[in-house]
Image (spheres, grey):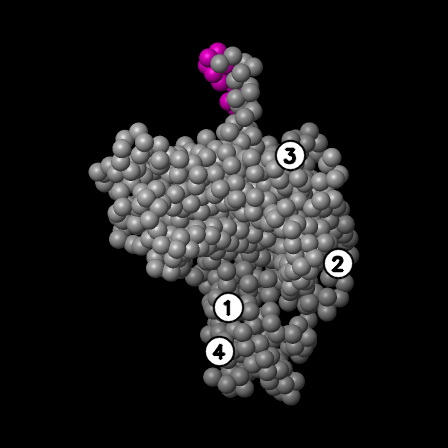
Amino acid sequence: MAIDTLLEQIAGAEISSDTTLLRELIAAIRPNKASNIALASDRLRALCFLLSTKPEYAAALRQYLIAVVSERKLVHLCTDTGITLSEGFWAAAWQRALYKILPPLTNDSYLRDVFGTLFNQVDDHRWIHGVDEKIWMDLIQLLDFQVSRARVRPDGIVNELLSAMQVLSYRISAIGLESELVRNYPDIERYESPFLRQNDEINDYITEYRNWLRDHSTEHRDSQQIEVLLAQCEEVVVKIRRTATHQGVSVSLTRLLLRVTQSIARLRIMLELIEAPNKDHALLTGFRLFKELVYADNRKYSIGELIETNTHLLTMQVTEHAGRSGEHYVASNRREWLEMLRSASGAGFIVGFMAMIKILFSKLLLAPFGFAFLYSLNYSLGFMFVHVLHFTIATKQPAMTAALIAKSLDQSKKNLDDLCELVVQVIRTQFIAILGNVMIAMPTAYAIAWAWYGATGHHFIDPTKAHHLLEELNPFASLALFHAAIAGVCLFLSGLISGYYDNKASYNHIPQRLMQLSSMNWLFGVARWQRMTTYIGNNLGALAGNFFFGIMLGSIGQIGVFLGLPIDIRHITFSSANFAFALVGLDHQLTWQVWVISLVGIATIGIVNLAVSFSLALFVAMRSRHVSFEQTGELMGLLWKRFIKHGREFFFPPKEVDNLDQ
């Protein structure tokens, strides 16, 4: 229906709180696509023109809007919409999923519920935020709301705002008493809590203000002391976030901090509305609150929004732990570079035997579950053994170094020279790690195959198996690269798992709790058990990441067999070992084309492994820090110039660094 027709109906009807005409008016303004901001702006300008040329329309619409708002409870809209509720994360996720299918009953007495029916498109916030604020303010000015009149009515909108303030204040106090918050900031029990003091101050403020509404001859206090106490509450939140960097964090703590932060911000808006120095300021504040409420209402059933807001601090700590681990994967000088070569070579040696064991397991007659169990056991124990011996699997690096780069972006977004140097160090460390893995895994597998032949008189694998292994390396005639991408995802997930368990060890005080076990102290002795618990605390994340990474590599292929899907994994180090087994199994009878295709396949598998795991890890790390890097082109230019002038440094440590070490 046209806007002018709707305004005519509103002007001709009796004043009512029924929202039917208001829904139709909003629908007439709403563009067909939320991204069409120009159309929404034009329609709002047309509405402004009609209201300016026909004052009776403006008066009727103003009275209609006042009736819609004043006849309903405003408190819940101000205290619930856009503020995380107290239920747990999983309960909230399940509730949102159910509400997507069957929305809750709408209560017409609550403005919160009616608000959702007015802006019922999930992308309404896009065009509302997109339209220039001046157009909205012109519309509000034409409606000519008399803010001062609302103060005369104790039961009016101002009283609803005061009630909303009281509800928010009580919630902030309750959060300040939560045991998890107290545990992470014990000083809150030693000194007078600002979370409790702000409630006393706000209750006194509301009492005096309501008395002033009834009798203007009385006085009421200002909100300065409330602002001081709210600022102190925010300081506690900041301190808890800081301690989380070394003490760890949980989803429930993140949720508490989110709730209290949102409640304080909303409480400040309520105060700003009530304490507004003039009408224009009050209307502007009210409009900005309106935009915030529309966005929150549109996203109230979004599970993605729930995950992003409630796990932000946890994700940041997971990537933070991964970033600290990533520092060990960056060689800045010759000594560290050679140490990485030694570490990667040791891992390559062990992988050669892991590849042998997997092939032996594959010769058994088992169901897919049996193969998945044995393969997972082989991978998990092998990777954990690699870590215990302080060796390095090259493909584990990207998930760690990506978090380190994201941290560098967050701390120094403009210092591109330092960032360029870090990227170069990461590249050359990754190069030598891969070289160490592959150059040792292949000879190890080759030696195992010949030793097997010498001991048994027949090859470790038959020609059929050898051809199958070579086919799996072919990037053109098989799904090798797709399977390599799956392995890259597994590598990325293992990095997150490592960070998660490192965070869990810190937050739950795992080493200290283990030390309390008297039976273990008696069994191992206090000193030895303390060394063991310290090791667990420092390495729980790495061990867990390697364990679950092994399970993923060992089970995905068998899940594909069970489901009839073409999914499997390809890992560069195991692929190079398999090539050596196939080479011996075929008595070196390979054409040059097979040699080239196989070696190209190994190289491309490695590139895909690294690219997928690194890009996913970098994306998550940057999202967790809310980092938006807009200098990618400039950074790539610096890297290219560096490669042209000092290409050797991308693979070997610079000579000047070597001299400094001597």
| Disc marking residue 216 | 2
Which numbered disc flags the more N-terminal residue, 2 or 4?
Answer: 4
Q: Going by the image, does 463 lie left or right of 296?
A: left
Which numbered disc flags the more N-terminal residue, 1 or 2?
Answer: 1
- Which of label 1 and label 2 is nearer to you? 1
Kindly identify the amino acid type of the residue bearing the numbered disc 4.
Asn
Pointer 2 local density, CA inside 10 Å: few below 14, some 14–19, many at least 20: few
Q: Look at the image and give the residue range highlighted in magenta.
A: 513-523
Q: CA distance from mark 1 to mark 2?
A: 44 Å
Picture residue at 57% right of the left edge, 76% below the top: 37
Res. 568 visible in picture: yes
- Residue 247 part of the magenta-drawn span: no
Front residue of 310/454: it is 454
Kindly identify the amino acid type of the residue bearing the numbered disc 3.
Tyr
- Report x, y in % for residue 618: 56, 52
| Disc marking residue 185 | 3
Front residue of 221/509: it is 509
